[in-house]
Amino acid sequence: MATIFEGAEVILPDTVARVSVRVEDGRITGIDCAADGARRIDARGLVLAPALVDIHGDAFERQLMPRPGVFFPLDLALLETDRQLAANGIATAYHALTLSWEPGLRSVAQGERVLDGLAALAPRLAAENRLQLRWETFCFEARPLIERALGAAQTPSLAFNDHTSMAMLAPGLPLQTRPFDLAPDYPVVDLAQVATASKFAKRAARSGLETGDYLRLLAEVWERRPQVGAAIAHMGARARGHGAPMLSHDDSQIETRDFYRGHGARISEFPMNETVAQAAREAGDWIVFGAPNVTRGGSHIGSPSAAEMVSRGLCDILASDYYYSAMLGAVAQLRAEDRAPLHALWQLVSRNPARASGLADRGEIAPGQRADLVLLDWPEGAAPAPLLTLRGGSLAHAARGFGL
């Protein structure tokens, strides 16, 4: 049955206006048109917006392992994650699934379980749960899984992630300006020094290892470094062949951004300084920052202020990162700070992440677009609260009935 939303303030591609929006057969079929027998939804006093598209979120890890070493059944964890997505107005989400040489939560074996679990649950999920294959480039064991995922019906994105080199960085050098990770003279920590053990305690706990065992494993993996460049080139070629969007993570040097762009990664995810962000802008790359960076008033690791990057035109996309409700919270914060008009801010969480991911059918309220919509209770000066989320015109979340 066709449905028409009436009376809402609607976030359109180029303005915000009080217009009606007609939905039928999963698509937006009209703006400010006659009801023409459609079911009417009274949305007076509310805001109707394109549903959110999350290009990178790893908050699902808290459902998988809510406490260190405590794993929940996979289906329960994924269903709970899906409910959180829809309740936060997110109709499309790329789960940042880390594929690492570490055992435990971020292992390849766990990645296989998540890949298969999402496929099995797909008919029951409210939001469109996609995968960002967050590949630790030293983890050669992940390549068969990536190949399999790239061939799936729902193409994932591929993110080049090098936390191994970040872990090995010599003490006293800032992560934000560390050298290109594959530089021949990259400065490294001496793992034989006992004083370094505390730096790795959290990583070891996440992996279910004693710190000493973790350090020995890290030293073994570091021996792979001469082969990492070739592995990146191979996987980049495979991703290009499947038309998968690619990202590089935590770029700290222009050389780093240039390197990954050369392999097809046109999305700079969380650049660690303004110089790299500016280089990405000049090259026409998409630039992603974390929404929690905005809501908290800055980065928790000393990277650029996402709010300032928005103001300077150096941020195209805000991702949930580790907290799903941060996307809505960030838009509200930026609006309160008058960083840009609301319709422009909303593109950071809808149209832009969709287009960067190759999804041309969503992210805007316009005729022909998929009816991925969120209806918000958003009093002046308050946090927005999703009352209704639609994915392809189907009900994904409802805090009120609205006759649907």
Image (cartoon, grey):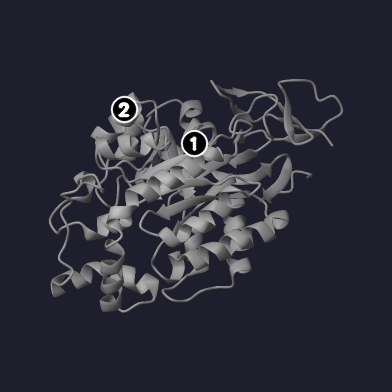
Above or below for 384 versus 342: below
Residue 394 in picture, x, y percent from top left: 74, 44
Q: Quadrant of the C terminus?
A: top right
Choose top left, top right, bottom left or bottom right for residue 23: top right
How many labels, in total? Answer: 2
Residue 336 in picture, x, y percent from top left: 40, 34
Above or below for 402 versus 334: below
Q: Secondary structure at mark 1?
A: loop
**Looking at the picture, which amino acid does disc 1 mark?**
Glu
Q: Quadrant of the N terminus?
A: top right
Q: Secondary structure at mark 2?
A: loop
**Looking at the picture, which amino acid does disc 2 mark?**
Arg
Residue at the image position 83 percent from the left and 31 percent from the top:
38
In the rendered structure, the answer to whether residue 195 lies left or right of residue 126 reads: left
378 or 285, which lies in front? 285
Residue at the image position 32 percent from the left and 38 percent from the top:
259
231 or 282, which lies in front? 231
Query: Is the residue marked by circle 2 packed among few (<14), some (14-19), or many (20+) residues within 10 Å?
Result: few
Q: Sequence order check: which comes first, mark 2 or mark 1?
A: 2
Q: Which residue is mark 2?
A: 312
Q: Which residue is mark 1?
A: 380
320 or 46, which lies in front? 320
